[in-house]
Amino acid sequence: KSRRRWYKRKYRQSVRAIETWHKKGVPWVSHFVLILQAERAVVEGQPVDIVKAAFDAAIRMSSRTGFPNNCALANERCALFFEEQGDTGWSRFYMEKAIRLYQEWGAMAKVNSLIRTHSLGLATTEIDGEAATHEADRAFRAAVPRSGEEKDSTTDTGPLNCSESHLSFS
């Protein structure tokens, strides 16, 4: 019991610090506030559509602010939420995106762990320690233009196209 109280206290302290930074305009926390709000919606038992919308907002903000690692995390957490709900379609969709983003980020141990633990019928291979999700690869290639190509609006994946940063760091 005391350990649980300690974790709850640490959680509240962390959330307060992040919210304070957000109010002060620290740019790297806005996406994280949205991830925490999505997690809070899960814990509070909000309806599925509200939880999905909260995660989608966190995913979009993580993408727009240039945090692909947190975009992957938000996709993963959303996939796990849908897995708990028994919705394998959405779970698989978000997990494929998470795996692809972790793979792009170079977190191969995480990719392999997700594939082993949450396969959800994903078509995967593991070659030389690197995992690839074939369906996610195809979707990603269709959604992200190659260098020099214009993005086709008919293949827009909406909030899940996280490998593109909308910020310019010039």
Image: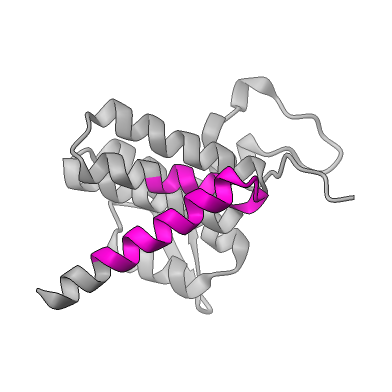
* Residue nearest the viewer, comparing 149 with 75: 75
Q: Is residue 111 visible?
A: yes
Q: What's the magenta bit mostly, secondary-structure-wise?
A: helix
Give the residues drawn in magenta, as a range. 8-36
x and y, in percent, of residue 49 in the image: 30, 26
Q: Taking 151 as reference, is 115 left or right?
A: left
x and y, in percent, of residue 80 in the image: 29, 51
Q: In the image, is residue 35 part of the stretch drawn in magenta?
A: yes
Instruction: Give the color scheme: rainbow, by chain, secondary structure or one colour.
Output: one colour
x and y, in percent, of residue 135 in the image: 47, 46
* Residue nearest the viewer, comparing 98 with 25: 25
* Residue nearest the viewer, comparing 7 with 70: 7
Name which quarter of the figure residue 53 lies in: top left
Q: Taking 19 as reference, is 61 left or right?
A: right
**Quarter occupied by the N terminus:** bottom left
| Above or below: residue 61 compared with residue 169 | above
Name which quarter of the figure residue 69 lies in: bottom right
Q: Is residue 115 visible?
A: no
Query: Which residue does the image show at 57% across and 52% down from the upper left?
Result: 21
Query: Which residue does the image show at 31% across and 28% down from the upper left?
Result: 50
Query: Which residue does the image show at 18% across and 47% down from the upper left?
Result: 84
* Residue nearest the viewer, comparing 127 with 44: 44
x and y, in percent, of residue 18 in the image: 49, 55
Q: Taking 4 as reference, is 66 left or right?
A: right
